[in-house]
Image (cartoon, rainbow, N blue to C red):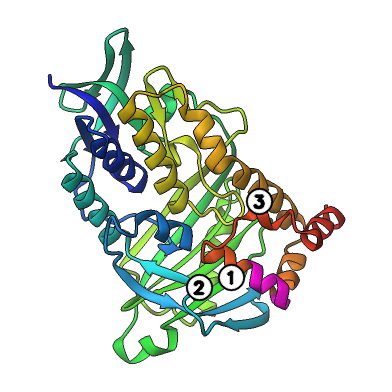
């Protein structure tokens, strides 16, 4: 066995951000990833400005489309369109390319990235952490950062608990060259028929990512929503190149983020925005924080650092989600207003956060009335 200062389980944005920061801190760092990059990942792939700010300078972001137009509907009705002339609202990436560039950056920083390596068990003793691999071998490290998703072994080991679980369904639809200008630069959002649900269409040059998300437990309704949404977009006759689903899990307020020498970040920690279920910015930020704390040995300070960086945003997101579930029509009306659109656009660009927005007097009053 090779003993490492930091071993990271999972090679997505959280794990690779942790590896980058840990290696830069001088820690001997290894990443254990069960797949092989570049690999497909179910994800809308829309980067908000917060994510761009996190990784800009670390990688050249492989943008497949800059979107400056947003089309918003309420279950297919009451459509409104908003355009910007001063820069994109969202930047679209394919996760195959985005994650692979994060992998290359982590390796360049000094981390060793091992692929096709599945971690099956986590054990701690006074001398460190042992990771049991699927081939029967072990990796030993002083500290482990778990970034293997909400259903991974590290989340179970730490005892992460979740207060919100949603099912996301998604298809990647190829678009003929002649039709691409119709979709280029346009984001479509639809507040769906299931409480708390919404759908999206994200353009990525030669494909469209079409997806919906709703609370787990309404699987048949969610499938029907996706089918109807694809048909509404006029895409029903095109065979998808990818057809997949995944669960997103939001951590409970008092859920642990650490168990002794094992920290969890990203989806493994249930760190994502509860209303939009945006997770990439939370993954890159929490991963970087975990990597720095693991690299310098300050494990005890990690939970407080996460709460300081992300806690207020998640609390605001929970409040927005509770109100949106009951009153989607009100959110639609607010977003259609000039003030609502400006606020949402600023959030998309990373110029503000939901916790800052809900403290503004008009928003505070509106939320109180709607609740």
Q: Earlier in the sequence, mark 3 or mark 1?
A: 1
First in sequence: mark 2 or mark 3?
2
Per the image, the residue denoted by label 3 is 355
Q: Mark 1 and mark 2 in contact? Answer it, CB < 8 Å.
A: yes
Query: Looking at the image, which residue is at 59% across and 49% down?
Result: 274
Q: CA distance from mark 3 to mark 1?
A: 15 Å
Residue displayed at 20% across by 28% down: 134
Magenta highlight range: 336-343
Q: Please report the residue visible at 35 percent of the width from the left and 70 percent of the height from the top.
A: 240
Residue 337 included in the magenta stretch of the image: yes
Near-viewer residue (324 or 172): 324
Quarter containing the N terminus: top left
- Relative height, residue 217 to residue 239 (above, below): above
Say what secondary structure mark 1 lies in. helix
Residue denoted by label 1: 345
Q: Mark 1 or mark 2: which comes first in sequence?
A: 2
Task: Name the residue carrying label 2.
Answer: 89
Residue 205 pos. (x, y %): 33, 78
Query: Which percent across, then down, holds residue 353?
Result: 60, 56
Identify whether 122 is placed above or below 16: above
Left or right side of 270 for 31: left
Q: In the rendered structure, find residue 16 and report the number of the disc placed on it.
A: none
């Amino acid at each position: 066995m090779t003993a490492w200062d930091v071993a990271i389980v999972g090679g997505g944005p959280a794990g690779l951000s942790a590896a980058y920061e840990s290696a830069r801190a001088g820690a001997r760092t290894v990443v254990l990833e069960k797949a092989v990059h570049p690999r497909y990942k179910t994800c809308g792939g829309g980067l908000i400005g917060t994510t761009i700010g996190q990784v800009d300078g670390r990688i050249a972001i492989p943008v497949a489309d800059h979107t400056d137009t947003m089309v918003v509907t309420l279950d297919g009705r009451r459509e409104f369109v908003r355009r910007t002339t001063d820069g994109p609202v969202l930047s679209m990436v394919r996760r195959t390319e985005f994650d692979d560039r994060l992998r290359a950056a982590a390796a360049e920083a000094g981390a060793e990235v091992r692929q096709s390596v599945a971690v099956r068990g986590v054990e701690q003793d006074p001398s460190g952490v042992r990771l049991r691999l699927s081939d029967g071998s072990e990796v030993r490290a002083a500290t482990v950062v778990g970034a293997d998703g909400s259903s991974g072994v590290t989340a179970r080991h730490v005892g992460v608990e979740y207060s919100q679980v949603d099912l996301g369904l998604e298809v990647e639809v190829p678009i003929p060259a002649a039709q691409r200008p119709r979709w280029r630069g346009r984001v479509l959002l639809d507040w769906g028929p299931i409480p708390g649900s919404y759908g999206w269409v994200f353009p990525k040059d030669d494909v469209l990512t079409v997806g919906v998300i709703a609370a787990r437990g309404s699987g048949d309704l969610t499938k029907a929503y996706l089918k109807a949404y694809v048909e509404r977009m006029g895409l029903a006759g095109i065979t998808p190149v990818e057809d997949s689903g995944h669960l997103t899990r939001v951590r409970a307020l008092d859920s642990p983020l650490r168990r002794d020498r094992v920290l969890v970040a990203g989806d493994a920690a249930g760190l994502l925005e509860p209303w939009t279920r945006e997770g990439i910015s939370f993954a890159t930020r929490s991963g970087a924080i975990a990597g720095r704390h693991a690299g310098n040995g300050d494990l005890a300070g990690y939970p407080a650092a996460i709460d300081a960086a992300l806690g207020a945003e998640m609390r605001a997101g929970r409040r927005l989600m509770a109100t949106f579930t009951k009153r989607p029509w009100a959110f639609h009306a607010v977003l259609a207003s000039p003030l609502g659109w400006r606020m949402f656009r600023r959030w998309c660009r990373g110029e503000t956060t939901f916790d800052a927005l809900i403290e503004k007097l008009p928003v505070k009053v509106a939320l109180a009335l709607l609740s």
